Amino acid sequence: MDFEFQLGYLRSQFTEKKFNLRRQSLAKRESYETNIGCASCGAKGKGRFTENENPVYTRGKLDRVVDDLDEGFSKNDSADEGMSCNSCESLEVRQV
Ligand SMILES: [Zn+2]
């Protein structure tokens, strides 16, 4: 392996690292409030969430986090959307 080649290799590694850093910083997180509803008993409320602003940079993953929910709903890790209904205990609580 000659010196020029090694230098080129190192340079490409460095550029790649810089590119990855840039990708990460482009994946901004966004907080928002939206209506939520229980599919089972029809209870309604609001929830606050944080997710990736532009999923293009995270391979389509939103990585949604439930920040806060109105009274009547609870955070619940067993539910698909991370929320459960307090009145009927359903896990079918979704953003509407
Ligand atoms: Zn319910």
Image (cartoon, grey):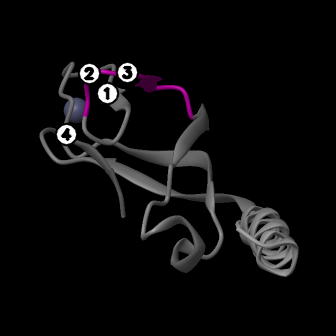
Q: Quadrant of ligand 1?
A: top left
Q: Position of residue 63 (x, y in %)?
A: 50, 50
> Circle 3 sits on which residue?
76
| Residue displayed at 22% across by 46% down | 42
Whether the residue carrying mark 3 lies under 8 Å from ligand 1 is answered with no
Q: On screen, 29 above or below 26?
A: above
Q: Is residue 73 magenta?
A: yes
Q: Is residue 13 magenta?
A: no
> Circle 4 sits on which residue?
92
- Earlier along the polypeptide chain: callout 4 or callout 2? 2
Q: Say if mark 3 contacts mark 2, CB within 8 Å.
A: yes
> Which image quarter: residue 57?
bottom right
Q: On screen, 59 above or below 73?
A: below
Q: Position of residue 7 (x, y in %)?
A: 87, 73
- Earlier along the polypeptide chain: callout 2 or callout 1? 2
C-alpha separation, residue under disc 3 versus residue under disc 1? 6 Å
On residue 84, the disc is 1
